[in-house]
Image (cartoon, rainbow, N blue to C red):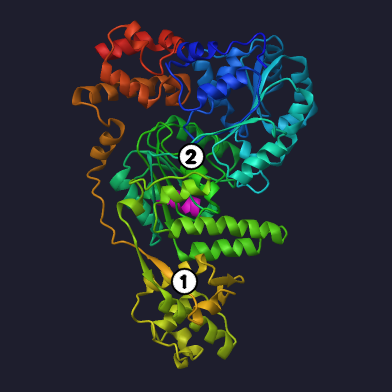
Amino acid sequence: MLDSDANPGQALEVLGKVFGYDSFRGDQSEIIDHVVAGGDALVLMPTGGGKSLCYQIPALVRPGVGVVVSPLIALMQDQVDALTALGIRAAFLNSTQDFETRREVEAAFLAGELDLLYLAPEALSGGSAMRLLERGRIALFAIDEAHCVSQWGHDFRPDYLALSVLHEKWPDVPRIALTATATTATRKEIATRLNLTGARLFVSSFDRPNIQYRIVPKAEPRKQLLDLLRREHAGDAGIVYCLSRASVEKTADFLVDNGIPALPYHAGLDARTRAGNQGRFLREDGLVMVATIAFGMGIDKPDVRFVAHLDLPKSVEGYYQETGRAGRDGQPSTAWLAYGLQDVVQQRKMIDTSEGDAAYRRGLAAHLDAMLALCETTECRRSQLLAYFGEQGDRCGNCDTCLEPPQSWDGTVPAQKLLSTVLRLQRERNQKFGAGQSIDILLGRKTDKVAQFRHDELSVFGIGTELQESEWRAVVRQLLAQGLLAVEGDYGTLVLTDGSSAVLGRQRQVMMRKEPERVRRSGGSGTAKKSATVAADLSGEAAELFEKLRAWRAATAKEQGVPAYVVFHDATLRQIATEAPGSLAALGTVSGVGENKLAKYGDQIIATIAG
């Protein structure tokens, strides 16, 4: 039922005047109208799809204050800065503020002088925040990163479980829960746990066509990463994910030693260092953040050109969420993952030693199996990624398996040889070893360890010389991925599974992925690549103006202490550079130039164009 004080027709007007856009994208208009009218909504929309507008505009149209539950305190200041730059009255309340600042924000909320108020989920489990909200008028509740409520998800946060109380206390206030990552099962869990089973569900396409997904065999991954950055992303901002804190530190040092500006981010750093590094990444151009998965949620930086993984993600959901931080501005971006046998062994070991019951470990194993299937597929990676979220897609032509199709080959005989080696070690010698020893036996290598255990006397010794060591490691990896081999114990020893006997008994064929021969990509010089990235499709004159506008933006952002994208996104500067408007009226027609920014920056931009 439509709130008597709300007018859905105002939404388009607000979009133009405040945000500087003349039309909505995808489901935005329908979602906004539904929430403005007082309806609850569960919104699944990919990163960069415009989720924020789905609650920001209703908060501006409906009477009262929009209350936004956001999981990361560290980013609230940047979110509020971005809204303030648009002329929106926004504020936040969290534990970083002193008493006087909190009192000022609370007074503004109670006086109706705010449009949006950001709160951390833990604040709503305490009494003071709830008492404050009870005294004010609330336009809506927006629950961002709603997948955090899923206990089976990759970003579970216990404080989200308490958010079901919002409906109990304010049954007439619309709620909108938003996430970029949710399978069908996760959607149901979100709806149940947040008491949104009656909410209208909006599911946008999960496809991010501007992201090129690439997964490569791991071989000196830091050097592989350095080659990628030098050839394809010189001077670009990006994120590199590593599994451990030690790997984060070593990778960041390695990049810096090789001339790539990089910063570390992990939970072992003190809070000030983490906040400082995050702030620099948001505000400076061309920085690489090397991080554990603790970094990234809520990052609004639109010009992240690549996301690289040096270790295997634990789930497809985590992989999609992390890679989605690339290319929020819609420009071409890269999602690159180096993946090897040790990743599989390590992840299996972590599952076996994890806390939780058997059902919990089975859930972790299922997540890993889906991630392994994505890595080992010979089909289009994008299609398989979309299928995981219940969406059908054709071959995309913009992932590694489409651009350089791998071949499938009959690996049944090599699989039998490898499984036979593991079987003979166990049955004839009562021994278990890791992949390296089995491969040495198959290749007929008379190493000290082979001699020590007299493994050269086994009938399988030297029967695998048709494959190289790297190919045997791929066989082991794919047998693990298909559940035909397993690892156990602290040393990652290989053991047979229930499925092994069918292969050994010639009752099952084993098809495997053969990596294509990689053609080294010609990236040209770093300078040329950088120019091509930021000034794509611009003429020489427009490209020159674009760089002048970027320099003006950088100086303005530094002076104001905000990230550059808070001033203007690259896409807006690119349109200004192309059209070179000569008046404020003409500048006001550019996408992304709302009334507040036109008044604030218009004269400076016109002067920059004229200069």
What is the magenta range? Answer: 247-254
Magenta-colored segment: predominant secondary structure: helix
Give the position of the N terminus as an image quadrant. Answer: top right
Asked whether residue 91 is in view, the answer is no
What type is the residue that disc 1 sits on? Val
**Residue that numbered label 2 is attached to:** 206
**Residue that numbered label 1 is attached to:** 476
Residue 223: % across, % down: 36, 56
Residue 84: % across, % down: 53, 16
What type is the residue that disc 2 sits on? Phe
Using residue 186 as the reference point, say whether residue 251 is left or right of it.
left
Which residue occupies the extreme bottom position in the image?
457
Residue 605: % across, % down: 33, 13
Magenta includes 249?
Answer: yes
Give me the residue at 59% from left, 13% from top.
Answer: 61
Residue 436: % across, % down: 46, 76
